[in-house]
Image (cartoon, rainbow, N blue to C red):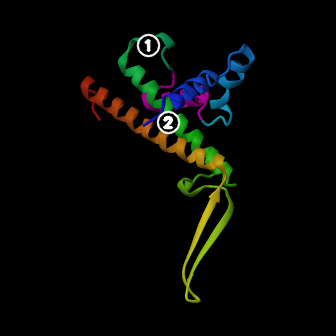
Amino acid sequence: MTSARQVAANRRNAQRSTGPRSASGKARASGNARRHGLTAAPAPEAVQRWLTVILDRTELPAAAAFREEEGLSRALVLARAEARVAGLEARLAALAGGAGHAPGVEDAMVLVGRKVTETWIDGQLVETRVREKHAPESELARRYLREARGARKRAFRGWVDWLRQAGVPA
């Protein structure tokens, strides 16, 4: 059980760890999540290109229509998700040194080192393990790509559900 003295020390320490208090400190900390740019919103041009494909139209409706019509809002969510996935796949391909093509994106990581561990018993090699270390940005990009693919899957399901409810033929 925690002593009263330890509880008091914990409370004192907690008072000191409240985050930035000055305006400049808050501004600096607010950019922490955007440092690598992997969570940035997709480019509006890419979203528009996906919208034209999804809606099968060359002319897009006014912005207000996307807020008012459920079908258009679902199409917009799907277009953003598609553009985000495409952007992250391109970023991973660029990190792997293959800018311009993205086959095997799942395996695209920048290798920065290997650690080999050998296990010897009675003078005989029993096991060898090789652990690869990858660049942090490529690991982050892979993580965000998995999340973006999940969001795209959910957006696609929402779009298809709306199409079925609206009675649009497939």
**Residue 163 location (% of width, % of height):** 30, 28
Identify which residue, 93 or 25, lies in the foreground. Answer: 25
Identify which residue, 134 or 87, lies in the foreground. Answer: 134
Specify whether residue 100 is in view: no
Identify which residue, 43 or 128, lies in the foreground. Answer: 128
Identify which residue, 99 or 21, lies in the foreground. Answer: 21
**Residue 100 location (% of width, % of height):** 66, 49
Residue at numbered disc 2:
82
Three-letter amino acid code at disc 2? Glu
- Within the magenta stretch, is there residue 46? yes
* Inter-mark Cα distance, 2 to 1: 19 Å
Residue at numbered disc 1:
67
First to last magenta residue range: 39-59
Residue drawn at 62 percent across, 52 percent down:
101
Looking at this rendering, what residue extends furthest in the right direction?
24
161 relative to 70, above or below = below
Q: Residues within 10 Å of mark 2 (few under 14, many from 20)?
A: many
